Amino acid sequence: MMRPEEHTVTHTINRYRSFRYELILEGVIVGAIAGAVVVAFRYLIGYADTLLHSILDFGQSHPWFIPVWFLILAAAAFIVAWLLKWESLISGSGIPQIEGEIMGEIDECWWRVLLAKLGGGILSLGCGLSLGREGPSIQLGAMAAKGFSRVTKRVKTEEKLLITCGASAGLSAAFNAPIAGILFSLEEVHKHFSPELLLSSMAASITSDFVSRNVFGLKPVFTFTITHMMPLSTYGHVLFLGVIIGAMGVVYNTTLSKTQDLYERIPWRLVKILIPFMLAGVFGFLYRGVLGGGHALVEELSAGDMVLGSLCLLLVVKFCFSMVSFGSGAPGGIFLPLLVLGAIIGSIYYRVAEHMSPSLSGLLVNFIILGMAGYFSAIVRAPITGIILISEMAGSFSHLLTLSMVSLAAYLVPDMLHCAPVYDQLLHRLLRKQNPDKQATLTGEKVLVEGMIFHGSAAEGKKVSAIAWPRTCLVVSLMRGDAEFVPRGDTMLLAGDKIVVLCDETSEGQLHRTLQEYCQTVGLRPEE
């Protein structure tokens, strides 16, 4: 029986050669679609947040309503638990799911994820759980892109590029941060750079940002004003803060993993979801500041009215509530909560240090943004994205040097302590839970996968035939500078080479692991 023409090897390769400019146009279309979906999501959770505070105000003045509100929270938890049963891949932020999709380990049903993530995310964030909007936005954008790919019958290689474009567009629309959206898709989601991917992600991210700004305006996410530049004499504090934040990033990732381990001991999904929803009800009447992602909390911190004791209490409660909320598996991200935690840490450091160093006077806002960038770098391990994200969210690029310093210090500490990045942890946990027979759901199409030969990797200086490629894979192209040729088995691989490998979709996950082990892991070779 003849296979459909769009599934053949010839079509896959020819399509790869000719689609660069078409992919830019598709990036614009994906950006518009993903932007519209995320804008709708962002608008609805904004309305839900306003409604939540009105309900809590009403409950405080009418005590009889408090038990009613807890019943409403229980009903919302039941709906979220049912949505998770209906489509389990909406749990958490959704970013590990997208990374698994790119690796070929997961095949999400795009329309089910779109519907369930929208409903579950609005209920979880709208009821006050300490979760962020960026993870759901990234997954929604990626699934909108996948839907476009499936409707227009794109080949698998192109589909994965479009999914990356959708993820970029999702983050861009969530935070009005188009450059951060591009960098995140390259640095964290796709973990690879190519001209096609860069141009299409740029088109998607810029288009999505344009859609978002037409609805929410041109103002940055955070409206506080940075009035002072940090003197050179304070740069020692920047590095020391980075070290502290790096250590606290290890605490965050370790605690999150342990929290998820504890939740796994609870056999009933409804009970898992009920815990954060009930806590949200308690905190709503006793300590409202820890509810939600914490956008307003950052601006409150910048006013400088909170004393040191209040800041420490806020840090502990917000940290614990974030762990409980995300660990339960409720649909929602960790971006914004971890940025808020970083802002609190920066504020605490400033309150302590200003008594010992008068030169720090008036630099509270500076330490808030340093805390956010450093904590993001320590936990996610995407420092470039963190630097640009905070700059775009704050509406200022005048602090790139100090942001870079704190991010570098915060990155090195968990790396030296061998603490894995948070999304790698979450992805490995997710893949362990997946049905071992999941490969049966894949289409069996041919996929083109790109890889780079890093300096110091095991593949550098080796012949193509010396690499233990998966059995169903074939290296079809090697790009060295501006030259491109078809390699043979005795072709020597050099640092900086870009290779294109053709494989069955069922072998894509194994191929990514091979590329990671041989081509992208840097280490000393025996002869050195």
Image (cartoon, grey):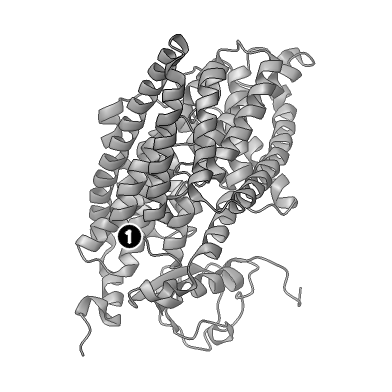
Residue located at (48% from left, 26% from top): 295
The foreground one among 528 and 103 is 103
Q: What element carries label 1?
A: loop
How many marks can you see?
A: 1
Q: In which quarter of the image is the C terminus?
A: bottom right
> Where is residue 318, by image quadrant?
top right
Residue located at (57% from left, 27% from top): 369
Where's residue 7, x and y in %?
26, 77
Disc 1 residue type (three-letter) = Cys
Q: On the rendered structure, is 253 left or right of 53? A: right
In the depicted structure, whether residue 104 falls above or below residue 270: below
Residue 94 visible in the picture: yes
> Where is residue 51, by image quadrant?
top left
Say which residue label 1 marks: 109
The foreground one among 388 and 255 is 255
Q: In which quarter of the image is the N terminus?
A: bottom left
Q: Residue furthest right?
A: 356
Where's residue 511, x and y in %?
50, 74
Residue located at (46% from left, 58% from top): 99
> Where is residue 418, by image quadrant?
bottom right
Q: On the rendered structure, is 125 left or right of 408? A: left
Q: How crowded is mark 1: few (under 14 residues within 10 Å), some or many (20 or more)?
A: few
Where's residue 68, x and y in %?
41, 24
Where's residue 527, x and y in %?
76, 77
Residue located at (69% from left, 40% from top): 246
Residue 202 visible in the picture: no
